[in-house]
Image: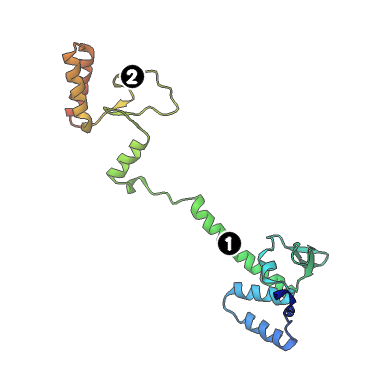
Amino acid sequence: MFGDLPRQDKPLPKALDDPTAAKFLRAAQAQPRQLVRVVCEVLIRTGLRVGELTALRADAVMRIGAGHWLHVPVGKLHDDRYIPLHPQLVTLIADVAEEYFAVTEKVEALYDTPAALPASAAGPEMTRMHREMHQRMLGNGYCTRPPALDCTFESVCETCTFFATTIEFRPTLQAQHDHAATHDHPGRQALFAELLTHLEQPAS
């Protein structure tokens, strides 16, 4: 049924006549935003489509002989092409690129070199948390052995010089002490008794 209807004409976009193009160019050059100016001037001076402009590579502007050319990759015309650039447009593109890379370097610097706070800026809680980040928590204390060192104790951590404990582990240590006492393990009982004694002593 619809196959007999004639196709509607889709005329090609009309190019701007010289007075209209000049008016458009003056309006673009009066724009306060540099990005708007460069986009408008590139479009009107090169005849690029918007899709072609956004698909340009970062190295699309190249020097051939004495002039600058814009390399447009394969697109709707099924072939890549080179468009000569007006010297004023080359200068405008260079200014935008210089500003872009200057801002990019500053932004990247924020991530590459984070601001270092002095040691005094960390309060007691942050200092404790930082210390515990590098410690492995055990059932009755912490293992402060550096990760690069092998551990040969495995199950007798309390006798290791890298073993550390704090007052919050006192109930566990007391229970281990009592268990050793009731099961006739005098060596373990003395070990836990010594750890409990150290907990009761004030820090020097």
Q: Mark 2 points at which residue?
A: 155
Q: Name the residue under label 1.
A: 102
Q: Which of marks 2 and 1 is nearer the N terminus?
A: 1
The colour scheme applied to this rendered structure is: rainbow
Relative to 159, does residue 43 appear above or below in the rendering?
below
Q: Say if mark 2 contacts mark 1, CB within 8 Å.
A: no
Can residue 204 be seen?
Answer: no
Q: Where is residue 19 in the image (x, y as percent from the top left)?
A: 72, 88
The number of discs equals 2
98 or 54, nearer to the observer: 54
**Quadrant showing the N terminus:** bottom right
186 or 8, nearer to the observer: 8
Q: In which quarter of the image is residue 160?
A: top left
User: Which residue extends farthest bottom?
Assistant: 19
Q: Is mark 1 on a helix, strand or loop?
A: helix
Tag 2: Cα neighbours inside 10 Å, few (<14), some, or many (≥20)? Answer: few
Q: In which quarter of the image is residue 22?
A: bottom right
Q: Residue at x 74, y 86 (%)?
A: 17
Can residue 148 be seen?
Answer: yes
Q: Which amino acid does label 2 sit on?
A: Ser
69 or 118, nearer to the observer: 69
Relative to 182, does residue 197 appear above or below in the rendering?
below
Relative to 129, does residue 32 appear above or below in the rendering?
below
Q: Position of residue 87 (x, y in %)?
A: 74, 73
90 or 184, nearer to the observer: 184
In front of the other: label 2 or label 1? 2
Q: Where is residue 5 in the image (x, y as percent from the top left)?
A: 73, 78
Q: Which amino acid does label 1 sit on?
A: Ala
